[in-house]
Image: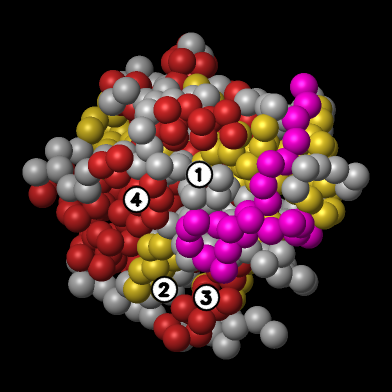
Amino acid sequence: MSGRVVQVNVSPGGVPKLPVEQARVGRSGLEGDAHHHDHVHGGPHRAVCLLALEAIERVQADGHPIEPGAVGENLTTVGIEIARLPVGAQLAIGEELLLEIAAPANPCDVIKHVFVRGKSGRISILLHPDDSRMYARVLREGVVREGDPIRVLPPAAESTAALHHGLDLLDSVEREAWLAAWRAAAAAGFDVRILDRGELAAAASPSLPGSSYNRAFGLRQIPIVLPEVRTFYADAGTTGWVVAGLDDPPWPGAVPEDPTGVHAGSVEAVLGRASRSTPPADLCIQPVDPSDDAQIDRWSEASIAANETPDEVAEAIRRTGPFLARTKGEHLVVADLNGRDVGVAASFTRRRVAWLGGAAVLPEARGLGIQRGLILERVRRGADAGCLTAMATANASSVSAANLEAMGLPRVWTRARYRFEPAGVA
């Protein structure tokens, strides 16, 4: 399959992007191009946006006043149905440039003026799969020119495009789960300062030291926000931790702490391994009724005991519990063995993904299969909520990681936390 570049488009931010004869393309995109919403667009996995002229003509035929560059694509192409290419497909453009299809580009309000009655969903991959814009990563830098030929190549065996496309969904759900926990703590009266800007989500809490309330997500997608995160923790006067890939540290010399595996798999696969969960016969795992303060207190106390929580943090769990339990999509469970609470767990459901949050078992009850029972119970509840995918995180090479693997949730990526001191990183 082959085609050519019809138009090369850039802008200092916003739309339309205007045609130029040529542009150099680096890892982060086209030189001279920028975004007003750089917390959503840009970054190494969304470096270049493409749209086929064939799609533009179909949208025009429906009465929408769209033109090349009007919806912010960097490269307008002809001869190739760009939206039909699989994630991982490569585009050899001109003499140097090599791109890799990374993901569809979701429409947003910035481009709604291009569509009749603001219906930008006309180029949504979900509603019109042939007419979506597509993002691409830059595998080999180079200059792109109007008229350059394009050759479509198959995905490389070592491609990570599909992995990162999947991580986009998983990260979005986990990010919302953490935001829910941070907002619950703020509602409980703690000084928790929150950044929620597109892919970037961060919390800083002078009153709750430690990484749980002082961490930032989003650097995998948009590393350009690193200075903003530095300023955020410097202003709060707290130590912070940035979550980023183990093999892609957020700044030169960054030291990884607590390598952590991201585990994910289908709900169906986990339910198919139910026989691998053999907890004690007398174990009873019960949901926490968010309207029952006594049950919420029970969950909080069991969590404090199972995690061997220090006194200065225990009070935060007690005060935050009621707000967390009443958060939409949050599900808490308590494991009871012979009349004694021996374990707790939480999960969060969004976008048909069940995020398996913190789970803990009392030290004297470990090794009995309770952890696997908690995994299965939360996935079952996720299935009842319509979830198709389950995900969790666990320290690399830990017992928790082994339990997730055994229950059908293999490790798909490894990341770490990278520490910021209050003054930032030199």
Real-space Cα separation, disc 3 to disc 1, in angstroms:
35 Å
Q: Which residue is mark 2?
A: 204
Pair 3/1: label in front: 1
Using residue 132 as the reference point, say whether residue 195 is left or right of it. Answer: left
Residue 18 in the magenta stretch? The answer is: yes
Disc 4/disc 3 C-alpha distance (Å): 30 Å
Rendered position, 137 above or below 12: above
- What SS does tag 3 mark? helix
Would you place residue 71 above or below residue 157 in this image?
Answer: below
Kind of element beneath mark 4: helix
**Cα–Cα span, label 4 and label 1:** 12 Å
Q: Report whether 248 appears left or right of 132.
A: right
| Location of residue 245 in the rendering, given as x and y in whole percent from the top left corner | 67, 53
Q: Quadrant of the C terminus?
A: bottom right
Answer whether residue 84 is magenta in the image: no
Residue at 79% across, 35% down:
150
Mark before the other along the chain sequence, 2 or 3: 2
Secondary structure at badge 2 equals strand
Stretch in magenta: 1-27
Residue where numbered disc 1 is placed: 67
What secondary structure is the stretch in magenta mostly built from? strand
Tell me the residue at 55%/22% (across/down): 408
The quarter holding residue 192 reads bottom left
Q: Residue 310, how many percent across, how many down?
A: 39, 66
Residue 207 in sight: yes
- Of tags 2 and 3, the one toward the viewer is 3
Which of 17 and 162 lies nearest the eye of the viewer?
Answer: 17
Q: Residue at x 25, y 59 (%)?
A: 184
